[in-house]
Image: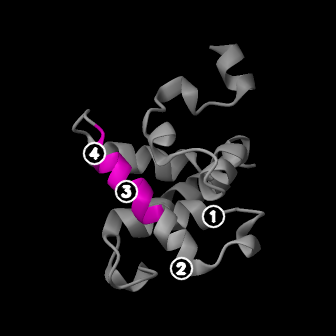
Amino acid sequence: RSPSRERRRCQQRRALLLGPRKHMSHPSATRPERALLAALKTDNPDIDEYPERYLRWVAARLARALESDETGQFADRVRAVCFNLPKPHNHERRRALCNRTAPPSSICGLRGDSWASSDRRGGR
């Protein structure tokens, strides 16, 4: 991918997290839930397997898990998950989260290098 395309995607995700109500997918969901829902949907090849209602439920569970994370950095953690979850090398994590084979707490515990691809981790 080109850097400009990646930058545009990052701006779109940021707009979903911080933008006006017109970008929100469900009016009763909180802003972090809507941002996490967008992260679950973005570039998800398995999107047709999950109904919208189910993905909203997964996003709500993930938001609650991030909120109960004891680091006290809720907004930063939501942004990190929204940025990293749609990446192609994290597809299996997203699939496990959606299939309920991995609890939301497993995503909450990921920091820095844990999100990186194996190629990028090897280069550090």
From the viewer's perspective, is 88 left or right of 72? right
**Residue receiving disc 1:** 42
x and y, in percent, of residue 98 in the image: 62, 58
x and y, in percent, of residue 23 in the image: 43, 80
Vertical relation: 30 (above or below) 2: below
Q: Quadrant of residue 113?
A: top right
Q: Which residue corresponds to the image point at 66% horizontal and 48% vertical from the top-left?
A: 96
**Residue receiving disc 2:** 53
Q: Which residue corresponds to the image point at 62% horizontal and 53% vertical from the top-left?
A: 86
**Residue receiving disc 4:** 68
The local secondary structure at tag 2 comes to helix
From the viewer's perspective, is 94 left or right of 79? right
Report if residue 31 is visible in the image: yes
Q: CA distance from mark 2 to mark 4?
A: 23 Å
Residue type of the residue flagged with mark 3: Ala
From the viewer's perspective, is 28 left or right of 57? left
Q: Nearer the observer, disc 1 or disc 3?
A: 3
N-terminal of the pair, mark 3 or mark 4, is 3
Q: CA distance from mark 2 to mark 1?
A: 16 Å
Q: CA distance from mark 3 to mark 2?
A: 15 Å
The local secondary structure at tag 3 comes to helix
Residue 63 is tagged as 3
N-terminal of the pair, mark 4 or mark 1, is 1
N-terminal of the pair, mark 2 or mark 1, is 1
